[in-house]
């Protein structure tokens, strides 16, 4: 923290606390362990329970591993209750099925994507590009799968 080093608080945790306005031991003591933890969480950081224990240890002036299990459970319950009151994250989509819709547009010979012949077959016929059934020979009779008898050549 600024100038005063708090026990259990490393450089990353100290930076998080500074960024949420908690610069001294007194600042943290005034709001308490859970509120200090929640300010970091609300700011968008991803603190773990280790930060919760580290803040408590800093306020009690003991190593964070010396915090009794009963007190740890109290801190966890309080942090979970406070977390449940947070609004849903804005950057995550709502939990619902996602449908992808693909719109097929008719492509013109001069349109397409970059002139690569999108939406037309390579034989020079117009159409939908699948080469099936609706194309006719010059005399109006249907060929094999809509293809000319001379394998697609046009003279």
Image: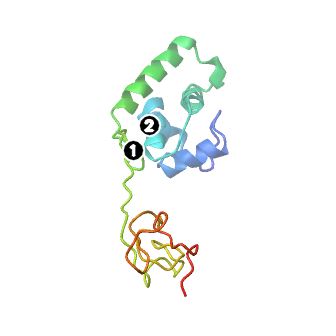
Q: Nearer the viewer, residue 24 or 37?
A: 37
Q: Quadrant of the C terminus?
A: bottom right
Tell me, for residue 104, which label it has, or none: none
Q: Is residue 1 visible?
A: no
> Looking at the picture, does residue 122 appear above or below residue 9?
below
Residue placed farthest to the top in the image? 70
Residue 56: horizontal and vertical position, in percent?
Answer: 54, 27
Q: Which residue is mark 1?
A: 89
Q: Using the rendered view, name the quadrant where residue 84 is placed.
A: top left
Q: Earlier in the sequence, mark 2 or mark 1?
A: 2
Q: Name the element at disc 1.
A: loop
| 96 to the left or right of 39 | left
Looking at the image, residue 132 lies above or below residue 87? below
Position of residue 102 relative to residue 50, above or below, is below
Q: Position of residue 7 (x, y in %)?
A: 65, 34
Residue denoted by label 2: 38
Mark 2 is surrounded, within 10 Å at the Cα level, by few (under 14), some (14 to 19) or many (20 or more) other residues, namely many
Disc 1 residue crowd, few under 14, some 14–19, many 20+, Cα 10 Å: few
Q: Residue at x 48, y 22 (%)?
A: 76
Residue depicted at x 59% and y 49%: 15
Number of marks in picture: 2
Left or right: 131 in relation to 60: left
């Amino acid at each position: 923290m600024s100038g005063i080093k708090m026990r259990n608080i490393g450089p990353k945790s100290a930076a998080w606390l500074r960024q949420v306005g908690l610069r001294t031991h007194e600042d943290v003591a005034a709001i308490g362990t859970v509120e200090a933890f929640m300010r970091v969480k609300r700011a968008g950081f991803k603190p773990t329970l280790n930060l919760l224990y580290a803040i408590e240890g800093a306020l009690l002036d003991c190593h964070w591993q010396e915090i009794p299990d009963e007190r740890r459970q109290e801190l966890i319950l309080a942090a979970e209750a406070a977390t449940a009151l947070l609004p849903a994250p804005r950057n995550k989509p709502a939990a619902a099925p996602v449908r992808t819709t693909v719109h097929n547009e008719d492509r013109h010979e001069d349109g397409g994507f970059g002139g690569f012949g999108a939406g037309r077959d390579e034989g020079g016929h117009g159409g939908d590009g699948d080469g099936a059934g609706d194309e006719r020979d010059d005399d109006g009779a249907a060929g094999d799968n809509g293809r000319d008898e001379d394998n697609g050549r046009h003279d």
